[in-house]
């Protein structure tokens, strides 16, 4: 199978993530999209992150029974901070029967050359890119291993959702009902 890997902190997972993942699964040659829950993104502050198992559980609830989507905790057992190339290599070794592609937002192309071993990512993996607003074209936009995928631009951020929760405002329609219930019951982000 060809698996698209959608990395993120998913803090929390929201409908924008789900729409993008489903679009990638249905509009590319990927058989499935796996959400890779990152314990700690080396480019983000650690302080506001929920525990990785809580974020994993929210993703599992959000995707429900969609056979095109899955979630993996593969990075939980890898050295931290986790780097994409290390996770890709580990997954390729663990699942040699699968072919993996990296899913990323177009904004990541502007600083892709700063990623650890970005050249190895390009050598061994395809990159599926979803559009982001106001991104200048880069040398990566025309790279043979990079494919721009027609996907909706959903401008929802987990930061916006966390702020709404902190202000005791509704997050209905921003996350799935199952995720909203978990957030409320466990009093996340308060």
Image (cartoon, rainbow, N blue to C red):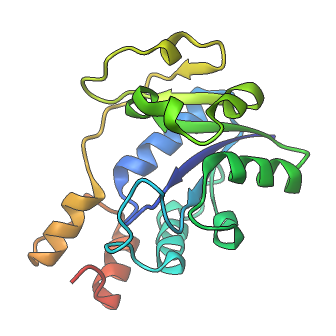
- Residue 23 in percent (x, y) is at 50, 36
Q: Residue at x 32, y 62 (%)?
A: 175
Apparent side of residue 8 relative to residue 15 in the rendered image (left or right): right
Apparent side of residue 89 relative to residue 117 in the rendered image (left or right): right
Q: Residue lying furthest bottom in this view? A: 186
Apparent side of residue 40 relative to residue 183 in the rendered image (left or right): right
Say above or below: 10 vs 112: below
Query: Do we see residue 172 in this rendering?
Result: no
- Residue 82 in percent (x, y) is at 60, 59
Q: Residue at x 49, y 65 (%)?
A: 40
Say above or below: 104 vs 63: above
Apparent side of residue 91 relative to residue 146 in the rendered image (left or right): right
Q: Residue at x 54, y 65 (%)?
A: 64
Residues 110 and 129: in front is 110
Residues 59 and 108: in front is 108
Q: Residue lying furthest right in this view? A: 97
- Residue 18 in percent (x, y) is at 44, 50
Q: Residue at x 77, y 30 (%)?
A: 124
Quadrant location of the C terminus in the rendered image: bottom left
- Residue 75 in percent (x, y) is at 65, 64
Quadrant location of the N terminus in the rendered image: top right
């Amino acid at each position: 199978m060809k698996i698209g890997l959608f990395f993120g902190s998913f803090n929390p997972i929201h409908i924008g993530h789900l729409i993008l993942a489903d679009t990638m699964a249905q509009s590319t040659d990927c058989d499935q999209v796996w959400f890779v829950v990152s314990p700690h993104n080396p480019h983000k502050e650690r302080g506001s992150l929920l525990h990785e198992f809580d974020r994993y559980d929210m993703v599992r609830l959000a995707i429900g029974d969609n056979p095109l989507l899955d979630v993996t905790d593969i990075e939980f057992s890898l050295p931290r901070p986790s780097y994409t190339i290390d996770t890709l290599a580990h997954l390729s070794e663990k699942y040699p029967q699968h072919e993996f592609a990296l899913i990323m937002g177009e904004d990541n192309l502007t600083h892709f050359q700063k990623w650890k071993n970005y050249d190895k990512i390009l050598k061994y993996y395809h990159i599926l890119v979803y559009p982001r607003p106001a991104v200048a074209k880069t040398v990566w936009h025309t790279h043979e291993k990079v494919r721009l995928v027609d996907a909706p631009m959903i401008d929802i951020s987990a930061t916006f959702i966390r702020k709404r929760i902190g202000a005791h405002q509704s997050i209905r329609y921003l996350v799935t009902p199952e995720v909203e219930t978990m957030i409320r019951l466990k009093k996340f982000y308060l």
